[in-house]
Amino acid sequence: MILYFSKILIIVLLSSSFWPKDQWTNGYISMEQSNNVKGIFTLLIFLGHSASFIEVNGLLDTPYLMIISHLEQAVVVMYLFYSGYGMTESYKKRKTDYIRSLPSKRIVPLFFNFTLSIVLHIIMCFYLGVLPSVSQIILSFLGWISIGNYNWFVFVIISLYILFGLSFAFSSKIQSEIKALKTGALIMTVLSVALILLFRFPGKRPTYFYDTLLTFPLGIWFSIYKEKIDTYLSSRLRFLGAVVVCLLIYINAFMFRDMSFWIYEIWTVSATIIFLFITMKIKISSRILTFFGKLALPMLLLQGLPFNILSHLKVNDYPYLFVFLSFVISVLISVLFNKFTKLIGTTKK
């Protein structure tokens, strides 16, 4: 695995440079930069998932295993952060029109694409001779359980979209724009915590369902205070101080993250901020990473297909071949999936 991980690292290093002083405030959280960052994590998530189907115990794999075990769920935090930030920026521009468009523009298309991916996984289950029950099929369409796909992310995203719409539909009645934004963000934060508690106790969902969830409202708050944050961090001394404080929080939270769920939450939030600090100084520009950043959702939805089919064919007895073939097939079916959903209008062109 270290060979594949090294290739990702080389791509990142070759495409990285320092931001010019007059460009970083607009560039570090731009669509281009965020797609590059998402591209990095899309590849890391693929490697992490593929490792669960093969034996990764070689001496050269040790550094990779250390990194991936350190990152854990932090590989998804930037997706949620960027989503919260981007939705808030769109709300600022379009106000209630944006809230009204959420069901037709975001929620329904995402659910349709997810449903389509479930159909493909059901076909796979029939091919493998592992027939899910009717209740399992119904719950899989709802995103509550998995039948070989990585359902939890879509379930969480749709839940957050709905909560965002409710939060800002309520706060939009406030005349002051800044008060409306802060009220919406506060309601969204409270509802996010409530969602975590529902997932944890009555829902009894695995922790990966909800342990990165707070990075979505973090993106909302960041959108509200971005200008003030940029102004404050424009000083090298203040930037260095903020990085040191965040690193200390990160290190301490990491050391004790297994002791308490809420300490784990502090760790995921501080990890998100550290990733953000890095992007404030480092510009990442790669066509390869941009490609995978735009392909993030179908890659996540569909990579379970080659993993399970190739494992059924015992290809995972040959780890490097398994990862290579899984990757090629995942990319191909994700591209075809994107083309089809764009054709029917459920994915943006």
Image (cartoon, rainbow, N blue to C red):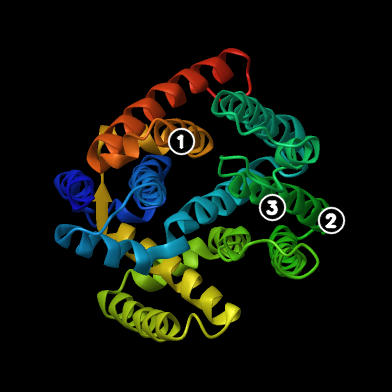
Seen in the image, is 154 located left or right of residue 339? right
Q: Earlier in the sequence, mark 2 or mark 3?
A: 3
In the image, which disc is placed on residue 160? 3
Q: Is residue 53 above or below residue 275?
A: above
Q: Earlier in the sequence, mark 2 or mark 1?
A: 2
Q: Looking at the rendering, which quadrant does residue 94 occupy? A: top right
Q: Earlier in the sequence, mark 3 or mark 1?
A: 3
Q: Secondary structure at mark 2?
A: helix
> What residue is disc 2 on?
170
Q: Residue at x 39, y 22 (%)?
A: 332
Q: Secondary structure at mark 1?
A: loop
Seen from the viewer's position, the closer of residues 201 and 247 is 201
Q: Looking at the rendering, which quadrant does residue 181 occupy? A: bottom right
- Horizontal and vertical percent for residue 59? 15, 62
- Horizontal and vertical percent for residue 184? 74, 60
Q: How far apart in space, not on screen, are marks 2 and 3 (Cα)?
A: 15 Å
> What residue is disc 1 on?
303
Q: Looking at the rendering, which quadrant does residue 131 occupy? A: top right
- Horizontal and vertical percent for residue 249? 42, 83
Q: How far apart in space, not on screen, are marks 2 and 1 (Cα)?
A: 38 Å
Nearer to us: label 3 or label 1: 1
**Mark 2: amino acid:** Phe
Tally the numbered discs: 3
Q: How far apart in space, not on screen, are marks 3 and 1 (Cα)?
A: 23 Å
Q: Residue at x 62, y 49 (%)?
A: 152
